[in-house]
């Protein structure tokens, strides 16, 4: 385990939820923000998570949003599996410990698997269609969701944070990142059209997931999408953000941190993603939104490249990293994807 905590401490936390039952705990290396663990008892599995409170500053917001959304889903015709948070013996869904640690326990969804990259267009279609159905179900009513992270989809702020990081980065980090800094420079205003469309109401606000990456879908053995997971960023924003993020994640032929090849975009998968995304939503999107799907895909990928690059320049303070240039490799992977999308779409 990466964590410095003793195993017995994890066990004690799990037991606050399930009582004095023996269990084995192992870390699941999935996700760049929270810490996630698989808990096995003799007859059942659970998912234990420590919420990263330097990023999710009010875990109570995540909980309130989750409860609202889950209620809406439960009262809809949505039939895929849902995340079930378990209460502690004191009835709390989040257990607080020293150092502002916030822990939660969920049911494990049996016979499920995740992908780190999409193996083929059919799986991309299944994932996008699953999200499409999810959006349809969670938008029967626009919920008043609270912002889990301030300005999460404020692209102007993202660019400004990047520009600031260029002024505060060490000379060494700037030198290491020189190539990609030059590559991203011509597109710093790419988000202007997005901002205008948001301001004039052309991109409507819906309930969105805001992190529909491929590893946030559970599949069964037949590669059917059986559950949408990771509801931490659900918020009111444009569905085009989610479409862009799906394209970003599903059309990448490489894992997100692999920059060993420049050609990592699959147009065949992109076509499947678009078809899947629209499968339940065609009536919900306006002609203007439909016209801007390709633009949204390019923009969200570009912004993700900027986010990774900003974090590298800031000294790797946001995303988990496994080696010194990890964020830079991620930024390069995303920028390659963006460059190809820009030429093809
Ligand atoms: C983060 O931690 P995870 O994998 O759920 C990030 C997303 C990025 C994603 C890139 C709160 O998600 O926005 O798209 O990494 N989440 C947050 O892999 O910043
Ligand atoms: Mg997430």
Image (cartoon, rainbow, N blue to C red):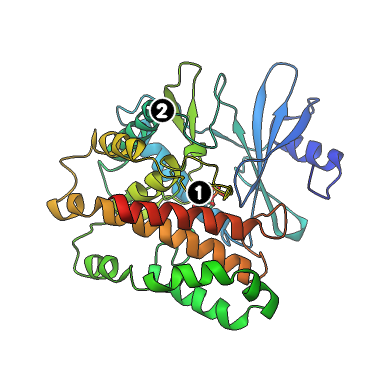
Tell me: is circle 1 under 8 Å from ligand 2. Answer: yes
In the image, residue 140 above or below residue 127: below
Secondary structure type for disc 2 = helix
Q: Nearer the viewer, mark 1 or mark 2?
A: 2
Tell me where residue 34 appears, x and y as whole percent: 63, 49
Give the farthest residue toward the bottom.
Answer: 167
Q: Which mark is residue 320?
A: none
Circle 1 is placed at which residue position?
232
Tell me where residue 71 appears, x and y as whole percent: 39, 37
Q: Residue at 66% x, 72% y: name it.
A: 173
Residue 144 visible in the displayed image? no
Is the residue under label 2 in contact with that under label 1 (CB below 8 Å)?
no
In which quarter of the view is residue 187 placed?
bottom left
How many numbered circles does the render carry? 2
Disc 1 from disc 2: Cα separation: 24 Å
Packing grade of label 1 (10 A; few <14, some 14-19, many >=20) is: many
Secondary structure type for disc 1 = loop
Circle 2 is placed at which residue position?
123
Tell me where residue 79 appears, x and y as whole percent: 36, 24
Q: Is residue 169 left or right of residue 132?
A: right
Give the farthest residue toward the left.
Answer: 287
Q: Is residue 177 left or right of residue 100?
A: left
Q: Residue at 62% x, 62% y: name it.
A: 318
Of callouts 1 and 2, the N-terminal one:
2
In the image, residue 190 above or below residue 337: below
In the image, residue 239 above or below residue 327: above
Q: Residue at 57% x, 83% y: name it.
A: 167
Tell me: is circle 2 under 8 Å from ligand 1. Answer: no
Q: Quadrant of the N terminus?
A: top right
């Amino acid at each position: 385990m990466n964590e410095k905590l003793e195993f017995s401490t994890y066990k004690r936390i799990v037991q606050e939820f399930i009582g004095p039952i023996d269990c084995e705990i192992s870390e699941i290396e999935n996700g760049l923000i929270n810490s996630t663990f698989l808990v096995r008892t003799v007859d059942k599995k659970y998912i234990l998570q420590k919420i990263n409170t330097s990023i999710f500053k009010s875990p109570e917001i995540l909980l309130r949003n989750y409860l609202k959304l889950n209620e809406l889903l439960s009262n809809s015709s949505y039939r895929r599996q849902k995340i079930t948070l378990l209460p502690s013996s004191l009835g709390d869904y989040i257990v607080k410990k020293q150092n502002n640690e916030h822990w939660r326990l969920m049911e494990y969804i049996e016979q499920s698997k995740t992908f780190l990259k999409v193996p083929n267009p059919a799986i991309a279609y299944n994932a996008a269609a699953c999200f499409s159905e999810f959006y349809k179900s969670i938008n029967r009513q626009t919920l008043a969701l609270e912002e889990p992270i301030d300005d999460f989809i404020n692209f102007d702020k993202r660019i400004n944070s990047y520009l600031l990081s260029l002024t505060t980065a060490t000379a060494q980090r700037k030198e290491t990142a020189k190539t990609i800094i030059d590559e991203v420079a011509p597109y710093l205003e790419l988000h202007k059209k997005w901002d205008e469309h948001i301001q004039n109401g052309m991109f409507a606000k819906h309930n969105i997931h805001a992190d529909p990456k491929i590893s946030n879908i559970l599949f069964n053995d037949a590669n059917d999408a059986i559950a949408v997971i990771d509801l931490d960023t659900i918020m009111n924003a444009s569905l085009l953000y989610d479409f862009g993020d799906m394209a970003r994640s599903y059309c990448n032929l490489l894992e997100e941190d692999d920059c060993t090849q420049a050609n990592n975009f699959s147009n065949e998968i992109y076509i499947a993603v678009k078809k899947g995304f629209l499968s339940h939503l065609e009536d919900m999107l306006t002609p203007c939104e439909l016209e801007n799907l390709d633009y949204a895909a390019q923009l969200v990928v570009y912004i993700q490249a900027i986010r990774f690059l900003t974090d590298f320049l800031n000294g790797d303070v946001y995303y988990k990293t496994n080696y010194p240039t990890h964020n830079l490799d991620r930024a390069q992977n995303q920028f390659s994807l963006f460059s190809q999308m820009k030429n093809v779409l």
